[in-house]
Image: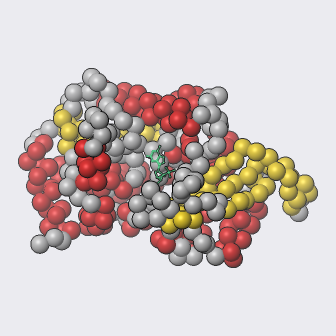
């Protein structure tokens, strides 16, 4: 019968049989699926697994450190952390179109990941966090390969010359099953129940051109919003919540006098399938508290707005 323990034992046995003594490479994003694959493969094959974690400079506050702490420090997983912030930001300079930004971020991820893979000469397998809904989705797509690099950032294709066999241990599982397995493998609940985070990260939450100064402000605002959602037991009641950086200036007054700084929009939605969504009717008192904290604690922000757009007609992300 289905218990997370039984499934883990079964998946571990299957992975061992599939890869034998071979070495396996995994792109670890910190998202649920790739995290569960990392924990599972570590249990199954230990040191035969090497993970590559690319810090693209568009991650949330402390995210890279948390991923390294969970996997490298606590679990003893081999993780290569690549600090590629400068490369991503340089490639994004002057670009404001959302789809171009997505493409640049996706291509740069492949370039960086491929360079790391090339350094690991004796790797035979590439692990992917493909889950059952991805398999169904890609079966309907033209190439059938849409899922291929899904475990890291939905960028839509592997380098042609990367001749690795695929190991996809979560292929038959639904998201809720993946979460239960993650808990069984000892991953922290807040990682396993984290809201989805888009592959292009803050790159599509900074409207228009991406700049490091904007990303730093956004990280601070987003961290306050998420921290308060958790503190008020609201995090698990919404499907996705985040802050968006608007590169327009607005006047404000504070104790220190007049301010002319940027605007943050807060977005929180409730949805089953992310195809349609309603804006979360968060308590006014809560929104008031978050707004005050953001403006008081972040000198570069003078105003906070709450997004009351449903999907449709608006999308969940602003870009
Ligand atoms: P939208 O904005 O289309 O978002 O209503 C629906 C869901 O998809 C996520 N999303 C993305 N995920 N790469 C991703 O991996 C992307 O480029 C991307 N764009 C949107 C979004 O966060 C939401 O969960």
Percent coordinates x, y for residue 296 in the rendering? 76, 62
Tell me where residue 69 sits by quadrant: bottom left
How has the structure been colored for display?
Answer: secondary structure
Position of the C terminus, as image quadrant, is: top right
Q: Is residue 237 left or right of residue 113?
A: right
Question: In the rendered image, is residue 208 in sight?
Answer: yes
| Position of 291 relative to 129 (above/below) | below
Q: Residue at x 57, y 54 (%)?
A: 313
Percent coordinates x, y for residue 156 in the rendering? 36, 36
* The furthest residue to the right: 257
Q: Residue at x 49, y 72 (%)?
A: 237
| Position of 22 relative to 186 (above/below) | above
Q: Nearer the viewer, residue 315 or 192?
A: 315
Q: Nearer the viewer, residue 98 or 310?
A: 310
Q: Residue at x 27, y 60 (%)?
A: 174
Question: In the rendered image, is residue 129 in sight?
Answer: no
Q: Residue at x 11, y 49 (%)?
A: 16
Q: Is residue 8 left or right of residue 262?
A: left
Q: Nearer the viewer, residue 77 or 5?
A: 5
Give the tally of numbered discs. 0
Percent coordinates x, y for residue 76 in the rendering? 30, 52
Tell me where residue 257 sits by quadrant: bottom right
Percent coordinates x, y for residue 23 in the rendering? 19, 38
Position of the N terminus, as image quadrant, is: bottom left
* The furthest residue to the top: 161
| Position of 229 relative to 28 (above/below) | below
């Amino acid at each position: 019968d289905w218990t997370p323990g039984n499934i883990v034992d079964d998946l571990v046995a299957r992975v061992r049989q599939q890869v034998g003594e071979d070495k396996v490479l995994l792109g670890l994003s910190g998202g649920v699926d790739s995290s569960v694959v990392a924990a599972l493969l570590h249990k199954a094959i230990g040191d035969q697994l090497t993970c590559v974690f690319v810090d693209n400079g568009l991650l949330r506050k402390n995210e890279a450190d948390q991923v390294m702490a969970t996997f490298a420090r606590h679990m003893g997983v081999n993780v290569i952390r690549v600090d590629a912030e400068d490369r991503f930001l340089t490639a994004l300079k002057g670009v404001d179109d959302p789809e171009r930004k997505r493409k640049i971020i996706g291509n740069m991820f492949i370039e960086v990941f491929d360079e790391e893979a090339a350094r690991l000469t004796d790797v035979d397998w590439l692990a992917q966090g493909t889950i059952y809904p991805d398999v169904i989705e890609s079966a309907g797509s033209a190439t059938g390969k849409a899922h291929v690099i899904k475990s890291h950032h939905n960028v839509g294709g592997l380098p042609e010359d990367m001749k690795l066999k695929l190991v996809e241990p979560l292929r038959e599982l639904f998201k809720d099953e993946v979460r239960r397995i993650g808990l069984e493998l000892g991953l922290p609940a807040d990682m396993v129940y984290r809201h989805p985070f888009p592959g292009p990260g803050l790159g599509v939450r900074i409207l228009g051109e991406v700049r490091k100064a904007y990303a730093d402000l956004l990280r601070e605002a987003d961290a306050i919003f998420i921290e308060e959602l958790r503190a008020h037991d609201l995090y698990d009641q919404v499907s996705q919540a985040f802050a968006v950086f608007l590169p327009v200036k607005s006047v404000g007054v504070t104790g220190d006098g007049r301010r002319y700084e940027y605007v943050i929009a807060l977005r929180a939605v409730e949805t089953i399938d992310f195809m349609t969504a309603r804006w979360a009717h968060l308590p006014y008192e809560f929104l008031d508290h978050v707004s005050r904290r953001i403006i008081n604690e972040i000198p570069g922000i003078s105003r906070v707005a709450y997004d009351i757009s449903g999907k449709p007609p608006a999308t969940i992300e602003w870009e």
